[in-house]
Amino acid sequence: MTYSELYQKSMAEPLAFWQEQAQAIDWYRFPKKILSQDRHGLWRWYADGLLNTCYLALDRHVQAGRGEQTALIYDSPVTQTLERYSYRQLQDETARFAGVLQQMGVKKGDRVIIYMSLVPQVVVGMLACARLGAVHSVVFGGFAAHELALRIDDAKPKVILTASAGIEFDKIIPYQPVLENALREARHKVKTCIVLQRPVHKWQLKAGRDHDWLQVQASAQPVDPVPVKATDPLYILYTSGTTGKPKGIVRDNGGHAVALRFSMRYIYDTQPGEVYWAASDVGWVVGHSYIVYGPLITGCTTVLYEGKPVRTPDAGAFWRVISEHQVKTFFTAPTAFRAIKKEDPEGLFKEKYDISCLKYQFLAGERCDVATLEWAQQLLGVPVIDHWWQTESGYPMLANPAGVELLPIKPGSAGKPVPGFDIQMLDENFESQPAGVEGAVCIRLPLPPGCLPSLWKAPDRFKESYLSAFPGYYFTGDGGYVDADGYVFITGRIDDVINVAGHRLSTADMEEIVATHPAVAECAVVGVLDSLKGQVPVGFVVLKSGVQVSEKQVQEELAAMVRERLGAIACFKQAVVTKRLPKTRSGKILRKIMRHLAEQKPFSPPGTIEDMAVLEEMENLMADHHIGAWQQEAKAKPGS
Ligand code: COA
Ligand code: AMP
């Protein structure tokens, strides 16, 4: 079957298509209702199906004779550790840890927050929740206490799983201070924490609240998987939106398992027994889908890599892992390649390793610039596939369907729509745009299985945030266009979300923090292009009249505030003092225009602009501060 035939089938007969795909996984009760609507009018897949995601990821493979196959390789250059877990071992550890959680009172539907580093126990923790039908919510280790507290208050977990520390390059990040502050700040009170003590740093256990992970697991009794409904939530993953309050993306059990199994075969061309590596973090959706669930549901070997593309110990780190573990399919963010290219522009480190096992290189998480894609292609000599998705979708919406047929690669495009996704570029009159014309990237409802059915306990916010702008469609937040051959080009977010080193962040969130500085009268935070991280935030601040403070001081104080409240991953380092901000006559700050100014993109100022002169002032200010300088250099040296 060709890609085009498969795609057409998914559009013409979606129910038959997804019923057939559902047969690729095991069910306790195969669903009769393939698609239905819930009491909020939201679409649900496989509503009467019964299954267990942990069973699919572990027990099923052991029963089918894969017990001795390696399920997970833990490769940690930062601790000099290499461990292999067979499917049987991972099943045993998970079943016993599910026993621990059960003893602590966790049952089906309860939430468990996981704030940990990339160690095998994080996978055990996630799968143990799935085994019990409990709902995990992993919080990325780079978020600060306030962000963790927001998530605790929204998810209301019964238990928190954590580790004593994370390791970033050679820096030890103790988690206890973050967790203690978050627990103090949160209104929801958590009575139980299970702590993995890492040798690099000890956690001071609090009697009555904290339990040592390995100790409690040693004496626990294994627990069998609990059948859950396909529509029961498997996890909540918080992501940045256009306000300071993170959105709790819900993933259900049934649609998720079917969609991931489908994607492993048709997009990633990866079969049971093969080695799949996603160099990401379990705090992000890539880690959920393609470190943990996708490869394990498929019966692959997954690699859990606690390291970086560079300096752990060098720019050959990725090539070592690929060669040592015989990785067939590798997935990372373009930032990682930019980091390697910066340190090893000639790709000399690659020569030290035999990576002939590698068949595909997938990139996603942020826009992939053509220079990076071409550099990677030349270096690796395998298809380098840019593909596009988001936390909300859980798996790719645009890709090159390598498992069906490998389409010619067009640099700059994230490929063609994945079967199930009816992607349209719409204008403000909800009209679909012809080839070459940019529009808002929208997906006709219903979304296929695996995509978010709603936000955690907030169906109205879900409708308001995603379904209201373009009736009958889900709005992705991105802009883009289709070319005459049906390839889609994503041009970037058209809301206040930015992507820093593949990490999705909200500028509105940062503005809320910047605005609390006593010297700041008003501010705008915009994402500007960065040669390593893709984008970085820059704050433009208007000071209160009469305030005597230098730009340097304001910048340092604001950087410290954002780091303290949001986390180091925000990479908020630059703040520029300006006399005024471009605004409409009604007082709305023209952030999009500021972004276009920084990117030197042509734009037409709205008729409602308060004063045109401010644009020239802003342009000069940006030039003085070298904002967008990378963009200028890249234009001057095409292909660099
Ligand atoms: N826990 C605690 N702190 C973290 C963290 C974590 N899990 N992840 C990042 N941070 C901190 C970093 O230590 C750094 O702190 P610093 O300002 O004190 O140095 C800060 O957050 C910014 O991190 P980052 O943007 O990642 O920059 P970096 O210089 O540490 O690393 C790269 C740069 C390119 C090597 C790194 O971003 C990378 O490997 N990116 C790959 C992208 C990726 O995996 N994306 C996931 C989505 S697919
Ligand atoms: P996240 O939810 O963190 O995965 O971030 C999703 C957002 O990252 C998308 O809405 C896009 O803005 C951006 N993104 C992800 N992959 C790509 C890609 N291949 N090309 C362009 N942008 C991407």
Image (cartoon, rainbow, N blue to C red):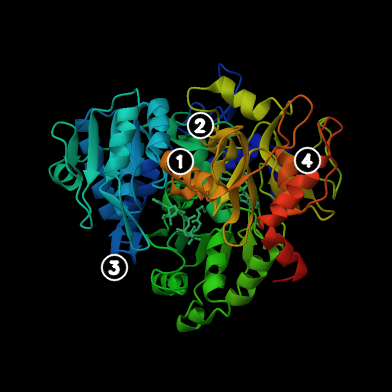
Q: Residues within 10 Å of mark 3 (few under 14, many from 20)?
A: few
Mark 3 / mark 2, whichever is N-terminal: 3
Looking at the image, is mark 3 or mark 4 nearer the viewer? Answer: 4
Residue 104 x %, y %:
21, 31
Q: Residues within 10 Å of mark 1 (few under 14, many from 20)?
A: some
Is disc 1 in contact with disc 4, using a CB cutoff of under 8 Å? no
In the rendering, which numbered label is found on residue 561? 1
Mark 4 sits on what residue?
614
Q: Is residue 606 left or right of residue 533?
A: right
Q: Give how far apart the Cα atoms at labels 1 and 4 are.
A: 28 Å
In the rendering, which numbered label is found on residue 80? 3
- At numbered mark 2, what does the secondary structure look like: helix, strand or loop? loop
Name the residue at 52% across, 71% down: 358
Position of the N terminus, as image quadrant, is bottom right
Amino acid beneath label 3: Gln
Amino acid beneath label 4: Val
Q: Is residue 570 left or right of residue 211?
A: right
Amino acid beneath label 2: Thr
- At numbered mark 3, what does the secondary structure look like: helix, strand or loop? loop
Residue 163 x %, y %:
27, 47
- At numbered mark 4, what does the secondary structure look like: helix, strand or loop? helix
Mark 2 / mark 4, whichever is N-terminal: 2
Q: Give how far apart the Cα atoms at labels 3 and 1 are.
A: 34 Å
Mark 2 sits on what residue?
516
**Residue 1 visible in rendering:** no
